[in-house]
């Protein structure tokens, strides 16, 4: 909801008359669709990563596969928001600036969340 208000303030100069309610609804709809597209991309990334892991031939170094399974399990234990940020940074290789813009939050907030997420992953990986 707060995203909508921020977007309305940013884009108020683009309102050209007509139905204000319709204009607000269009903005809300666009934000919702952006969110759905983002979630779909995240799901595709996770599915692709899972598929690649399952297609990898078994190695004699079972500890490597064990670490991968352990990492996957640890990622699943993170909060959704933090897991999303870590995936965007390290699997999608987006910059912190790109992620902050995508999440519409200050870059310092993004950096802090990713740092805390990595710290938590280290704890979970033991």
Image: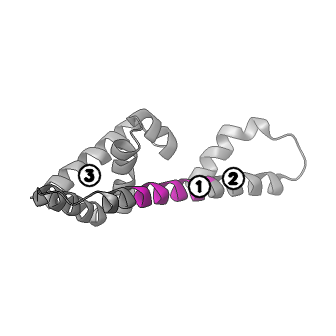
Q: CA distance from mark 1 to mark 2?
A: 10 Å
Q: Position of residue 20 (x, y in %)?
A: 83, 52
Query: Which residue is label 1 attached to?
Result: 37
Q: Earlier in the sequence, mark 2 or mark 3?
A: 2
| Residues in magenta, as a range | 34-48
Query: Which residue is label 3 attached to?
Result: 117
Which quadrant does the N terminus fall into? Answer: bottom right
At 86% across and 40% down in the image, what residue appears? 16
**Disc number lying in front (3 or 1):** 1
Q: Quadrant location of residue 108?
A: top left
Q: Is residue 118 magenta?
A: no
Q: Earlier in the sequence, mark 3 or mark 1?
A: 1
State whether residue 98 is above or below residue 69.
above
Which label was assigned to residue 30? 2
State the predominant SS element of the stretch in magenta.
helix
- Helix, strand or loop at label 2? It is helix
At 31% across and 48% down in the image, what residue appears? 113
Q: Position of residue 103 (x, y in %)?
A: 48, 46
Q: Quadrant location of residue 78?
A: bottom left
Answer with left or right where residue 33 lies relative to residue 105: right
At 48% across and 57% down in the image, what residue appears? 44
Q: Is residue 43 magenta?
A: yes
């Amino acid at each position: 909801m707060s995203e909508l208000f921020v977007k309305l303030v940013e884009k108020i100069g683009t309102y050209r008359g007509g139905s204000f309610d319709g204009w607000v609804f269009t903005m809300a709809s666009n934000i919702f669709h952006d969110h759905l597209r983002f979630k779909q991309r995240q799901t595709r990334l996770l599915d692709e990563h899972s598929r690649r892991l399952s297609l990898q031939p078994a190695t004699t170094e079972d500890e490597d596969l064990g670490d991968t399974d352990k990492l996957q399990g640890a990622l699943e234990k993170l909060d959704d928001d933090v897991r999303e940020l870590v995936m965007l940074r390290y699997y999608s290789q987006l910059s912190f600036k790109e992620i902050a813009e995508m999440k519409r939050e200050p870059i310092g907030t993004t950096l802090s969340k990713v740092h805390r997420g990595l710290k938590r992953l280290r704890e979970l990986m033991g």
